[in-house]
Each structure stands twice: as structure tokens, then as C-alpha cells.
Image (cartoon, coloured by chain):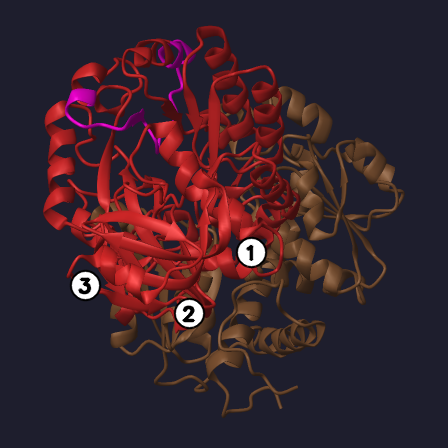
Chain colours: A red, B brown
Amino acid sequence: MWWLKDVWVIDPSQKISSSQDVLVKDGKVLEISSSMTEEEVLAKAQGEAVETINGKGKFVFPGLIDVHTHLREPGQEDKEDILSGSRAAVRGGFTTILAMANTQPPLDSRALVEFVLRQGERAGYAHVLPIGTVTKGMQGSELVEMADMKAGGAAAFSDDGKNIQNAEVMRLALEYAKLTGFPIISHCEDKYLAGEGLMRRGLTSARMGLRGIPASAESVIVARDLLIAEETGGKLHLAHISTAESVELIRQAKARGVDVTAEVNPHHLIFCDEEIRITDTVLKVNPPLGSPRDREILIAGLSDGTIDMIATDHAPHTQAEKARPFAEAPFGIASLETALSAVWQYLVKPGKLSFDRVIEAWSVSPAQRFGLLGGTLKPGTAADMVLFDPDFTEEIVPAKLVSKARNTPFLGKTMQGFPVMVWVEGRLVQRDRTVL
Amino acid sequence: MKWQRKDILAIEDMSVEEIRHILHTAKVMKEILMRPIKKLPTLKGKSVVNLFYEASTRTRTSFEMAAKVLGADTTSIAVAQSSVSKGESLYDTAKTIQAMRADVVILRHSSSGAANFLADILDPAVINAGDGQHAHPTQALLDIFTMQEHLGELEGKNVVIVGDVLHSRVARSNAWCLQKMGVNVTFAGPPTLVPAEMAGLGVKLTHDLDSALPGADIVMALRLQLERQKSGLFPSLREYSHLYGLTTERLKKTGKQSIVLHPGPMNRGVEISDDVADGVDALIERQVTNGVAIRMALIYLLIGGSSNVVA
């Protein structure tokens, strides 16, 4: 049994944000209360050994749920696989991760969905839930067997990595997915406006001669999908929102009662296009980093609930792929291991976001939207749980990363504030930053 | 001044002092180039590798000539297309060239930033011979060298660059270089090719060429890539030529004996009329000579450190 003493518990699902003691037994949260004597704890242990953790100055919260990760298996295991990706997840404080469908081949059938599910179970770290594609082969034309894939364990549907260009296909997907109750996750990017662009179109792209992607490449599809969701009554989730205009469109749609949720990636809250250097492929990401104004509006949108959740869009690539000229390097940032720390250091500590809101947006909100277990520390539920030490300091170096990828903008930087213990169903899987 | 730079990648990060030093060195090099026996022992035993991922006869030959006059050995590697799809990456190719003990690598590549990328990983000096839409510093330096020969001190002069500046590394490098020399630069062209964000280079933008011409000392026409029409960036050559083509008649609007430059090769009858092009031809010959002088200066400054032809 675990006894976490005098620890600051953040559990938005129970509206708790205060110093408490937490007991975990038999893989479940047993009790959260503000005062426990040793005698009471020993009585509850019923003879089991009690490991006591002094939680003073630390936080406990539900294990984070990341609804947007690329684990690359099957097909691109040189970048990442389900084992390395799910180890990276628990090192970073995530106990449930949703695996995107744009693998090779894409997860467009029940067999492939079940494969990913099984690989996640075999790995035995974070819960790995597959997202199925929306269309066969991610070709944007014929719908997949959504009901069968749900039966096989899919958690949602998305052609992420590619936008569904044909609006009628998007309409049909939003209609048909009603059979499953799952949202369609939309990667909003008009392929004509985005063209062969490499970064957000603006003064910085023009200066460096890097082809630009206008902000409208995202927001016109956000507008389209919101209108289709409204008309069909379908369930829509918007991935990696990155522009001010998109935030405004979502705000208006929610006011009209559209069934929509949206996520934002940590890097869009922390970086901006002006920081991109011509050799700095680590900040080459899709959607591209926006302007400082976009960043401000994204932070405000996350604070006020217009944006519902944070998701990493963990996009691992090999060093060789990123060690190319800017135009030829792939898009993406690997972030499972650093995302929470980065959000703490760059957003929570400076007072731009409350930690309670961060935990809500990264645990209970995704659990509710996607109908997942976890995201709560209610007594009786599985103890997917994180102990976070705001003072723990670590230099981000390749030797310590358990992901196969090194494409993080924090490489070589010293960061402060990390998850130092992580439990999945009450089983300790990470301690003092080492995956067990 | 003491030369400290390892590579020549872009004008943007160069100081005025460096630019003036290059132009001064090029002047000496041009004198050497005009001699009947134009061969120096200065870089004997040094090797210069031309690594060209885009077709270019003029620029490549110019670099080769420059290196040879200085006594260096040259090798040219022409790679038909970016090798990414064909296996060997730019990284691997460059490392191989380094292992063969090259002293200077001259790179032309279709990706913006390719030269900076190479300079970061290689010990030998890297000279950017054009990277994507980013920079073409030696072209800008030779343009400015030519302008100086005609006009003397350039400070306070007015230059109009007409055409597809959005996709042009020549326009970008010229804009940086000219502005550092105190020149007023205006970009002119249709809004699709001169979009508002080009103001990020600090230049004036206009879509009305005729209004930009009065007072212009130099007008530079850029080569219009004809395939841009297919991408919808302009409707027809006819309309483009009507609005932005340089004609004798239109050039009268400068009110001066303006110089017309073109980085070549010209689309006669499109961005430049035949009669104007004939005048430009004479200048192009001089630009070609100046190009060799500029490239001699750069190679010399980068690896000729211990000798002193310039003294």
C-alpha cells in the first residue's frame, strides 16, 4: 500500500486542490483525506506493507491522458515503437495515450487496431489506445468499418497527418461515426493554401525565403468542419489548434451549441514563428508555429475553456531525418518526455496558466470527451497517478531519453519541475525519472 | 580589417565593413584577372569543390575560374536533383567531400538554408552559390560591385527591383546588401509576387512600377519563372509584360540615365523588351567578369589567409 502524506492533490474531477493524504491499495485509490494517523493507515493496510512518501511541496494528480501521439508502429519503428513510446509516456507523466492512425499501413481495419492495442498491453507501461483512420488507407474517400473497429478497441477516428479535403466525406464521417459515439478528430489544413509551405507565412518566412503557410490554411477548414458538425449534429474534435482565428471560430460555435472540442499543443503555447532559424529543423512542425499574438490567444482560449485540452502531438523522427536542410526535414516535435515540464516551466510558473487548469485539460477533459477510464482520483478507481516535484531539475540529454527520438527543442536545456513517480493501476512504473 | 568569417552564407548577417572589404578585395582581383598571364600561386595545393544540386553553367564556371586563377584545384560535382529521394543525403555527401580534404565547398541547392546547414556540420569553408529562395550572396556582391563601377559611392541611391521577389534569392540578397550600403530599395511587382510580408526585409513595396520609377538610379528586372503562371501567380505573360516589363519608353520615367540590371538569363519580350535587353547584354559581360573577381575575393579571404596578394 502507498501512503502519500501532506501532498497537494489536484483532481479537477472532484474539485480538489488542497493538501491531502492519499492512500493507494490493490491498484486503486483507497482514500483521499486531509488527516490520517499512522494507526488508521495501518488498520486500512490490513497487514500489507505500507510505503510512505513525504509529499510536502509536491503535487499529486490523475495520470495525464494524451489524445494525440504518434507511436509509429507498425511501419516506422526506426522513429519510435509502442514500447519506447509508452515508456516515454510514463516518464513524462502520461498514463494513457491515444496512438494516431497514420502508421504504415494506416490503422484502417480492426486487425490493425487490435495489433496496436495488444502491443500496448505487451509493453505494459501507459495504456495505449489506438485511433482508427476515418477513411480507408487515409485516402480521404471511403469510410472505414467504424463499428467493427470500435469493437476491436479503437478510441476515436482520425486521418491526422492529412486533412480530409472532400467536405462531403467529412460530412459522411461525422454522420456515420454517430454509430460509435466517438468524435471524428480533424486535422485542419487546406492542402492548397498550405501548398509546399514550411513554416507560418509572415515576416519571418518572407525574410528567410522559407515558403509560408498562411494561418487561413487551418482556419478555413476549422470553419468548414464546425459548420458540418453543426448541420449533422456530429461529434467533432479539432486537433492541434494553432491560430487566433480558429480559437474565435470555436468560441462562436460552442456558443451555438455545436458538439465540438479542441486541443492545443504545448509548443504552440511556448514558441512562435519568430524564433525559427533557418537551420533549426527542431521547430519545424505542422501546424507551424504561429505569431506571438496567436500564442497569446491560444493561452487565453485554453484558460477560458474554449480550448478543452492539451495534447502533445508527440511526433518522433530519427536524427538523420531532422539533420537535413529545412525544406527536407520532416515536420514534428517529440515531446512526451518534456511536455509537462515545459508547460510547468514556461506557462504555469510565470503565471500564464493555472496548474489546476493544466491538469484538468490534460486529464479529466480528454477522459470525458473520449469516454476513457482515468482522469480522476475518485476512491475506487484505478490508481493512474502522478507525483510531480516542482523543484526537480534535469538536463535534457540523449542518454536519459527513453523515446527513440531526440527531436525536442529542449535538448541540452536544463528544466525544472518533473513527474518523479508515476503509477499505472497502482503499479509504480517510474521513480525519480527512471522508468521501471 | 581582419577577416574572421569561416563561410559566406548570406548577406543578412554581414557587416558593412565586411562587405566593403570584399568589394575592395574584388577590385584587386579584377586587376589580376585582366592581366595577360592570370595565374597566381596563392592557393596552390588547396582544393575547391563545387557541389551543385541545381543546374547552373554560369555560376559554376565562374567559381571554377576564380579558384583556378588563384591556383587552387577544383572539382565539380553536379547532382541532377536533391539526393534525398535517391539515397545519399546532403549530410553524407558533404561528409564525404570533407573526408577528401576539400578546403572550400561551394554549394548550390534547391532548399532554403541548405548552405547554412552544411556550414554547421563541415570544417571546410562553405560558400553559398544559391539556396532555394533564401540567399545568393555572391550574385548580390557582384551586382553591387558592378553598380559601384558605374555610380561610385552608392549611399542615397535608389534601386527598384521588379518581378517575382517572393521566390527570388537574388532579390533577397540584393535587398540586404543594398540597404546595408545605404541604398533605398523598392520591390515592384503584382501582389501575388510582392506580398505584404516582404516588408520584413525592410524595403518599400509597390504594385505600381511606374510610380516607383521616378528617381531610380538602377532598375533590376528579375527573371520570371514561366511555370509560375501555371500556379496561378499571374494570369498571362501578356498582362505581366504590360504591367511590369521594362521598355525604353517606361524607363524614361526615371528621369535619369538609369542602369538596368538582370541576373540572367533574360526572357526577352517578357520582363524586358528586346531593345532594353540589348543594352543590358553589354553590362552582363561586365557582370560576368566581376562575378569571377568577387568569387576570387571570397575564396581568397576564406582560405588564403596567410598570403597577401592584396597588400
Q: Is residue A237 magenta?
A: no
Residue for badge 1: A348
Residue A213, percent from left and from top: 52, 37
Vertical order, A225 against B193 (above or below): above
- Distance from label 2 to label 1 (Cα)? 35 Å
Q: Do dots 2 and 1 share one subunit?
A: no
Task: Classify 10 Å Cα crowding around label 1: few (below 14), some (14-19), many (20 and above).
Answer: some
Residue A374 placement: quadrant = top left
| Rendered residue at 43%/55% (across/down) | A340
Q: Chain of mark 2?
A: B
A284 vs A311, nearest the viewer:
A311
The numbered mark at residue B120 is: 2
Secondary element type, mark 2: helix
Seen from the viewer's position, the closer of residues A358 and B218 is A358
Q: Which residues are magenta?
A: A150-171
Mark sitting on residue A436? 3
Q: Is residue A124 above or below residue A48?
A: above
Q: Find numbered disc 3 in the image and state the secondary structure of the residue it sits on.
A: loop
Q: Is residue A163 magenta?
A: yes
For marks 2 and 3, give the one nearer the viewer: 3
The quadrant of the image that shows the C terminus of chain B is: bottom right
Instruction: Tell me where residue B183 appears, x and y as whole percent.
Output: 79, 58
Residue at image location 75% in from the left, 65% down from the top: B181
Quadrant location of residue A72? top left
